[in-house]
Image (spheres, helix red, strand yellow):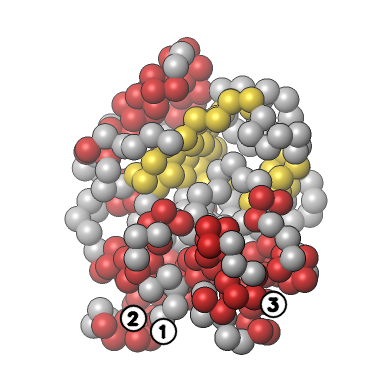
Amino acid sequence: MFAPCQPLAPFIDSYYVLEGNPWEGYQRVKLTPSGTSGLVVQYGDRLQLENDHHRNELLSESFVFGQLRKYVFLEACGGLKVLGVHFKPTGFYRLFGIPMAPYTDRAVDAELVLGGGATYLAGRVCDAGEAAARVAVVEEFLMRFLGKGPAVESIIDQAVQLILSARGNLSICGLAQSLRVGCRTLERKFRAEVGILPKLFASIIRFNAMLRVRQTAHNSWLDAAYAGGYCDQSHLIRQVKLFCGEAPSQLLTGDTDDLPTLIQHSYHHHLSGF
């Protein structure tokens, strides 16, 4: 992981560089919702994304991905070389001024979203050599967009922080009241700036917080679910099926390492401080 430079820190959470096979033999891996969006540059063999009709889509060398509302599959075909940018929940919107809703559940050619220069990123990143130099190439590209978007924090930034602080356990109507805004206005603005509705974002954060409790505290799955605020078993079952596509019995007796990820990045490290 690499931290962003100071001018980009309000928008970007981190960068990562992956080379080789981080999945230790996996070729087809599951991505689950994590509350993040980002930019990925491939300078090796290209990944394929399995769509709803089980047909594989070859991903562009540089692509933008939006929020996931349910699990999807990626297939690695050969030598993996990837540089990824993880944006803060509102970071993409604030840096580029581009509404995020059209990119939810999608991976789109970066040239179509960000315009000139994105097509050449993969070649420049490949030629850069070391990981830090590769990150510097992408940062140079991103710096061109400073001042293009609404850089001043909005009410949605406040909403995101409150959701993260509560680990997703809060009422969205209560959240709207605390921010002195109507529920529909909050939903409309949240969908534009984050890409999904606040209720779903809170559910994703809550679910990933529960997974963190299980992984770091070595609690049983049922204890972790209770600690995450899942007092209603039917609610937990629905969430497991939606986000992971598995029967609850499989997840509750398994290990999160069974779900290796690449462009997925949950806000676990943010949550750990609360």
In the rendering, which numbered label is found on residue 171?
A: 1
**In the displayed structure, does residue 116 sit left or right of residue 263?**
left
Front residue of 182 and 133: 133
In the rendered image, the vertical position of residue 273 relative to residue 181, given as above or below: above
**The furthest residue to the front:** 218
Q: Which residue sits at x=50%, y=30%?
A: 17
Question: Which type of secondary structure does the marked residue at label 2 adopt?
Answer: helix
Which tag, 3 or 1, sits closer to the chain's start?
1
The image position of residue 184, as x and y in percent, is: 38, 81
In the image, residue 30 lies at what x, y percent? 69, 50
Three-letter code, disc 2? Leu
Could you tell me which residue is drawn at 41 percent across and 84 percent down? 171
**Number of other residues with Cα within 10 Å of mark 2, as a class: few under 14, some 14 to 19, many 20 or more:** some
Q: Which residue bears the numbered disc 3?
A: 237
Q: Are marks 1 and 2 in contact (CB under 8 Å)?
A: yes
Q: What label sits on residue 61 in the rendered view?
A: none
Q: What element does badge 3 sit on?
A: helix
Measured from the top left, where is residue 65 in percent x and y? Answer: 53, 47
Give me the C-alpha separation between circle 3 and circle 2: 25 Å
- Specify which label sits upstream in the sequence, 3 or 2: 2
Three-letter code for the amino acid on which mark 3 is drawn: Ile
Q: Which of 252 and 203 is in front in this view?
A: 252
Q: Separation of disc 3 and disc 1 at Cα? A: 20 Å
Query: Considering only vertical position in the picture, is 126 above or below 211?
Result: above
Task: Name the mark nearer the viewer: 3 or 1.
Answer: 3
Q: Name the residue under label 2.
A: 175
